[in-house]
Amino acid sequence: MNANSFGQHFTITTFGESHGTGLGVVIDGCPAGVPFDEKLMLRELERRRPGSSEIVTSRNEQDLPQILSGVFEGVTLGTPIAIMVFNKDARSEDYKEIKKQPRKGHADDLWSSKFGNSDHRGGGRSSGRETVSRVMAGAVAKMVIRHLHPDLACYAYSAQIFGIALTPDEVTAIGSKTDIDSFPARFPHSEKSQEIYRLLKEAKEEGKSYGGTINLLIENVPANLGQPVFHKFKSDLAAALLSIGATTAVSIGEGFSSVSQEGVKFHSQDSNQYGGIRGGITTGEPVFAQIAFKPTSTVLDYAKKGRHDPCILPRAIPVVEAMANLVLVDHLLWMRKDRI
């Protein structure tokens, strides 16, 4: 499998650069007979879309998907599904200086060093713009999941941005019924989200950037998803999440805090300390993970004239959900082959 593909049974291959003609995805392994919900895909793309608020990049892409193959009369055919969006608001002239002077903390110089020839405009394929392909693929995965397991719910939200964080009690209060998208920066707390909004608006004006953590919760997960040894559910989930640009760490369940606990106490808890995964296999309990993101690499001194997010988290949330849904559908289809 090449480095632009992901998945074992529900396989995606993404293509395109930030300032190229467009970006897209080819999905192979999607079963025939799944109702194709284009409105669902449009909603997911709108959640990730640049230019959608004052605290994200001002690049204004409409991201209207074109279904090129694999769907007929509103239903999947079981053949490869190809979907594409075209870039409409790229300003490549803003990146002339970057070709000579790569941005600190970005992948510009490493891509050039590795391949010898790379597209420096807007970061090329290392840009966060690449994730539009993942969101389209994740939307199709969500359609399959809805068909197979309609109660399964996968959602993410900002849990910390810079020094502003949800408390453990505030995290516990959040559920699938919470209207996360109604909060600024998708930080589900009335007062703190307003504080974050002011922080990011000021950061955008002053050329600053911030990182943070995203919480991922998957409810009503079937038990027994995951394969022995090399395709544990947790390892595939971690690989999917860490493939997103700017991620620096993933923890599952109690994660890093588990190292400071004595074994008998840790394993005797009634809480879901394992994060819904034990032995690499889902237990049927909710799956919980945390993903850390570094501050956006491009700040004012190095942005030149380009347009960038002061914090990647608000638009990374639908990407996190998309990658989780891709892992879920891959393992749901795989589990059907586990035994007769």
Image (cartoon, rainbow, N blue to C red):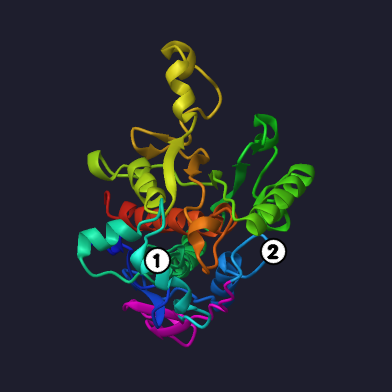
Position of residue 183 measured from the top left corner of the image (x, y, whole percent):
72, 54
Determine if the magenta segment contains residue 61. Answer: yes
Hey, which residue is sitting farthest bottom in the picture? 73
User: What residue is drawn where x is 56% and y is 65%?
Assistant: 48
User: What residue is drawn where x is 49% and y is 83%?
Assistant: 74
User: What residue is drawn where x is 53% and y is 69%?
Assistant: 305
Hey, which residue is sitting farthest right in the picture? 191
User: From where the camera sits, is residue 178 visible?
Assistant: no
Disc 1 crowd, CA 10 A, few/some/many (<14, 14-19, 20+): some
Give the image quarter of residue 97. bottom left
Residue that carries the numbered disc 1 in the rendered image: 98
Range covered by the magenta-colored residues: 59-85
Determine if the magenta segment contains residue 128. Answer: no
Image-based side of 123 in relation to 152, left or right: left
SS at circle 2: loop
Residue situated in front as seen by the camera: 145 or 83 = 83
Image-based side of 9 in relation to 318, left or right: left
Q: Earlier in the sequence, mark 1 or mark 2?
A: 2
The amino acid beneath tag 1 is Ile
Disc 2 crowd, CA 10 A, few/some/many (<14, 14-19, 20+): few
The amino acid beneath tag 2 is Glu
Give the image quarter of residue 161. top right
Residue that carries the numbered disc 2 in the rendered image: 54
Position of residue 72 measured from the top left corner of the image (x, y, whole percent):
43, 87
